[in-house]
Amino acid sequence: MPKTPSPCIDVCKFKREGHCLGCSMTKAQKSLFKELKKNKSRDAFIEMLLEQQKRLGKYGHWSPGYLKKCKKKKVKPVALVQDLA
């Protein structure tokens, strides 16, 4: 089974109090995600990130970009992401 891809959607501009404009991750969160090996851990991280995006606001562009990335990599996205689309 392919790994759950990184939530990064290749924007990488950390201008919102250290949060990326594209995915809302901080640099520390980005490093942490790379260390996660199991899909369950990666899925839980993405669910946490969705809550973070909700709290920060202005991340409606993220889920379509992430769904496109998952489709390209032939990976089923986390259910919560599908619900946003």
Image (cartoon, helix red, strand yellow):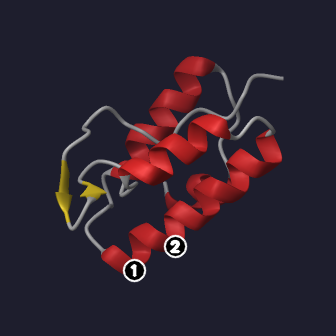
| Horizontal and vertical percent position of residue 8 | 42, 39
CB under 8 Å between callouts 2 and 1? yes
Q: In the picture shown, does residue 21 fall above or below 31?
A: below
Q: What residue type is labelled 2?
A: Glu
Q: Is mark 2 on a helix, strand or loop?
A: helix
Q: In the visual, does 18 lie left or right of 70?
A: left
Q: Which residue is drawn at 48% across and 52% down?
A: 29
Tell me where residue 3 sits by quadrant: top right
Q: Which residue lies furthest to the left in this view?
A: 15
- Which quadrant, please, contains the N terminus? top right
Q: In the picture shown, does residue 79 fall above or below 58?
A: above
Q: Distance between the Cα atoms at labels 2 and 1?
A: 6 Å
Q: Which residue lies furthest to the bottom in this view?
A: 55
| Horizontal and vertical percent position of residue 81 | 57, 54
Q: Which residue is drawn at 70% across and 36% down?
A: 76
Q: Is the residue marked by circle 1 packed among few (<14), some (14-19), or many (20+) residues within 10 Å?
A: few
Q: What element carries label 1?
A: helix
Tell me where residue 55 sits by quadrant: bottom left
| Horizontal and vertical percent position of residue 68 | 46, 31
Q: Which residue is drawn at 71% across and 50% down?
A: 43
Q: Name the residue under label 2.
A: 51
Q: Relative to the observer, which residue lies in front, 50 or 33?
A: 33
Q: Mark 1 points at which residue?
A: 55
Q: What residue type is labelled 1?
A: Arg
Tell me where residue 79 sits by quadrant: bottom right
Q: Relative to the observer, which residue lies in front, 40 or 62?
A: 40
